[in-house]
Image (spheres, helix red, strand yellow):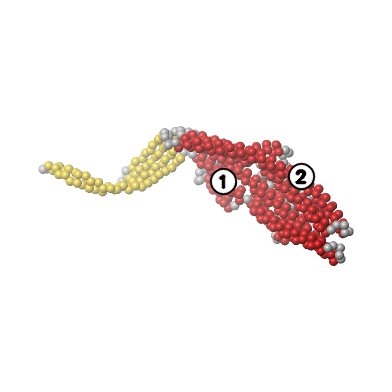
Amino acid sequence: MLGRIGRTTMRGAAVAVMALFAGTGAQAESLAQALASAYKHSGLLEQNRAVLRAADEDVAQAMAQLRPVIGWSADVRRNFGRSGAFVTTPTLVGATTSFREGTNISHEANLALVAELTLYAGGSNKLTLDAAKETVLATRAGLVSVEQQVLLRAVNAFMEVRRALEIVGLRQNNRRVIRQEVRAAKDRFEVGEVTRTDVALAEARLSAAQSSLAAAEGQLQIAFEEYRAAVGHKPGKLSAPARLPTLPGTTDAATAKALRFHPDMLQVQHQVTASELGVLIAKAAAKPTVTLRGQYGLQESLDDKSYSRGGNVTLGATGPIYSGGQLASAVRGSIARRDQVRAGLHQVQHQLQQNVGNAYAQLAVARASRNASEQQVRAATVAFRGVREEAKLGARTTLDVLDAEQELLDARAALISAQVDETIAAYTVLATTGQLTSDALKLNVPRYDPAEYYNLVKKAPAGLSKQGRDLDRVLRALGKE
């Protein structure tokens, strides 16, 4: 991508890689491969997938509230106590009264089967189910947002390593050339062509070049560590991106796409819907609740063969009359939370518009900087070669040569940074429109279907059912990853 200049600096960069980190592979790693590794490596994605599964289970629990609840109870009871009473006994001469006392002990067992179904709760059960579904959709959008963060971090890490490698290569090449200038200055000083001042200037520039190289190597190591954290392994040889991603032609088009498809916008939209349902749920708490309850039981004495069996069916209704203001407060609180989320929607909309505008501005700056830097490199190269030849003829001083070389080095470094900034800016634009995903980039990664687990649990299968056993196997497999 850098042409002849790029090839020269990459040779220097390869030396830096071997000096700083041993064992890198010979095959170049592409940006797409780095993004795929980051996607597979990210613990942040795994964390938020677990959050999504928990939201899926909230739907199952809300679904369970619409179904009858069947339970059982059993107990074995020992009754004991003492009783006494005055007893009057008739006799031939009249009657006698005596106090009699005894111990009462009995044993009994009870077994009951109870079923209860909520027939009406002001609509809160159905509303809770709908709110849980909206929360699932919001959490899915949040997972996509996290995916974009992971991939954009990987893009930055990949390009920053390339930037650092290129800069190290330039600094190494600069040090080598200045060393040659120092030797030439000393030789010319020996024959009286230059003064001691020229030699000192060259030596000072050499020290500055060594310092700059040390700083560049330190920055390279920092870039390596960020790459390891973002992608999951230390970088080897990295190939330049073949092309930039396809982007909307105008800022307005990108903004329209962002407002329609960006996961942050979708997430807050579903959160608004869920909060509006929360208001209805709070209002439903003031309505009566109607339940149907059935019970069938067996009571048996363990002391003899007596028993009783029977059951009952009860249709009951309950409702609040006065709750100390709690219900009214709950409604007001849910309205306030709804207004909070609505205001958040407004904020996200403006934030996305600003992010798109900023990203396009950064992309335009990077492109203009790259074009200017290419021209600057060409001009600085011609100037440096001319000054160096003129110095050989005595028309230029050593300081002139060093200044010309420094300008060329600065131009090359600016070009490298502009090319890296252009790539990062392009992928940042992609992220602001919500298209920096593994599906949109067609990355070679296992596809994660956020609806797969939801479809397994949305009908709240029982643990002993076939679907429940399938879920147990899925969770065990997830735990081994």
**Location of residue 83 in the rendering, given as x and y in whole percent from the top left corner:** 25, 46
**Location of residue 112 in the rendering, given as x and y in whole percent from the top left corner:** 39, 42
Q: Which residue is mark 2?
A: 368
| Comparing labels 2 and 1, the label whose residue is closer to the camera | 2
Query: Is residue 62 toward the left or the right of residue 395 in the image?
Result: left
- Residue at the location (77% across, 61% down)? 204
Q: Amino acid at mark 1?
A: Val
Closest to the observer: 88 or 50? 50
- Residue at the location (65% across, 52% down)? 230
Judge whether 207 appears above or below 43 on screen.
Answer: below
Closest to the observer: 443 or 380? 380
Judge whether 271 appears above or below 171 on screen.
Answer: above
Q: Amino acid at mark 2?
A: Ala
How far apart in space, not on screen, are marks 2 and 1 (Cα)? Answer: 43 Å
SS under mark 1? helix
Closest to the observer: 151 or 128? 151
Q: Please identify the residue farthest to the right as the structure is shown.
A: 393
Q: N-terminal of the two: label 2 or label 1?
A: 1
C-beta proximity under 8 Å, tags 2 and 1: no
SS under mark 2? helix
**Location of residue 79 in the rendering, given as x and y in whole percent from the top left corner:** 31, 47
Q: Residues within 10 Å of mark 1 (few under 14, many from 20)?
A: some
Q: Which residue is mark 1?
A: 51
Closest to the observer: 332 or 439? 332
